[in-house]
Amino acid sequence: MNLVVASPTGLCFGVRRAIGQLEDALTRYGVVYSLGSPIHNPPEVRRLMGLGLKLVDCASDVPEGAVVFIRAHGVSKAEYDELGRRAGVVVDGTCPFVTNAREKAESLSGEGYFVVVLGDSNHPEVRGILSYIEGESMVISSEDDIDADTRYGRLGVLSQTTQTEAGLASVVSRLILHSGEVKVYNTICRATIERQESIARMSAKVDGIVVLGGKNSANTRKLVEAAESLGASALWIEHSDELDRGWVMGKESIGIAAGGSTPDWLINDLTEKLKRL
C-alpha cells in the first residue's frame, strides 16, 4: 500500500503555539484551568489532562488565584475580563489570527457598519468575535442564509478563521446585491487555506483519504467536505483505533490529511498502523 501524507498537514501555527504555552504552564505550575477545551482534539486534550489540565464550563468555576489558560479559539470579552479578576496567572493562548478577526470586527462596528460574520454561531471563536461588536450584527453559515428580500445599509463582512475562501466569496457576491456599500476583511487563516489546497492536490492521486482530527473541529470538517466535494472517498477519524479495515481493503494508495488541531503523535500513530495492514 502506498501512503501519501498531505503537505502541509496537522498542527497549524496557532494551535502549536497554544499547546506549547499550555505545556510550559503545566510544567511550571502543575495544575492549570481552561475555560472549555483548549483545542478541538479530544485525544490531545486527554493527554494534557493527564499532565494536570482541568476543564471548567464557565469563568466563575475557576478558583480564586488559580492559573488559567485561554484556549486557541479565545473567549468572549466579558469572560476574559472575569478571568483576569479571578485568576492569579492568565496564560493567553488565543491564536493571533483569531485576535485579528476580533479586531477587524471591533473596527467595523466602530465605523458604523452592520457586521456580518461568516461562520458557526455556536463556535467559541465566533461567540468571541461577536462580543467585540457593539452595533448590529448577524452570523451566517452560507449565502443561503441571506434574506433575498432584505436591503441593508453599510455592511462589514469578515469570517471565522476556518471557513473557505470560496464560501466567503460567494457570501460577498450575494451581499453586494443587498447593500450600497460592502467592506470586506478576509480573516481566514492561511494555514486553513493551505490544508484545503493540499487535499485538492492529493485527491486525484489516491484511492481514498483518511482525515484525522477531532469531530468537534471546524477546520477538520472543512477538510472532509473539501475531499468529498472533489469526489474522493474520505474517512474521518479522531485516532488510529477508529480506522475501518473494511474501508482500507482494496485501496492501493491512501492519503493522510490532518486538521489544524491534530498533533504529530496522532499522525505518526495512524501512519504506522496503516503500514502494518
Image (tube, helix red, strand yellow):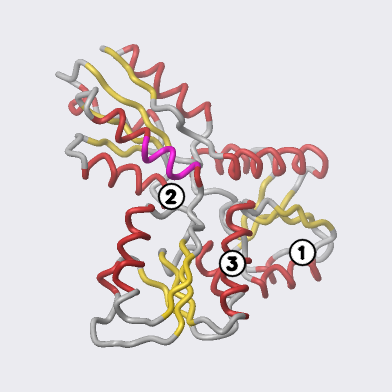
Q: Quadrant of residue 175?
A: bottom left
Q: Is residue 55 above or below residue 234?
A: below
Which residue sits at x=41%, y=16%? 272
Residue at image mark 2: 217
Q: Residues within 10 Å of mark 1 (few under 14, many from 20)?
A: some
The x and y percentages for residue 138 are 43, 78
Q: Is residue 252 above or below residue 230?
A: above
Residue closest to the eye, 6 or 80: 6
Q: Decide if residue 102 is on the left or right side of residue 224.
A: right
Could you tell me which quadrant the N terminus lies in?
A: top left
Residue at image mark 1: 63
Measure how far apart labels 2 and 1 are at the Cα level: 28 Å
- Is the magenta region chiefly helix, strand or loop? helix
Measure how far apart labels 2 and 3 are at the Cα level: 23 Å
The x and y percentages for residue 270 are 40, 24
The x and y percentages for residue 32 are 73, 50
Measure how far apart labels 1 and 3 are at the Cα level: 33 Å
For the record, the magenta segment spans: 191-197
Disc on the earlier residue, 2 or 3: 3
Q: Residue furthest left?
A: 250
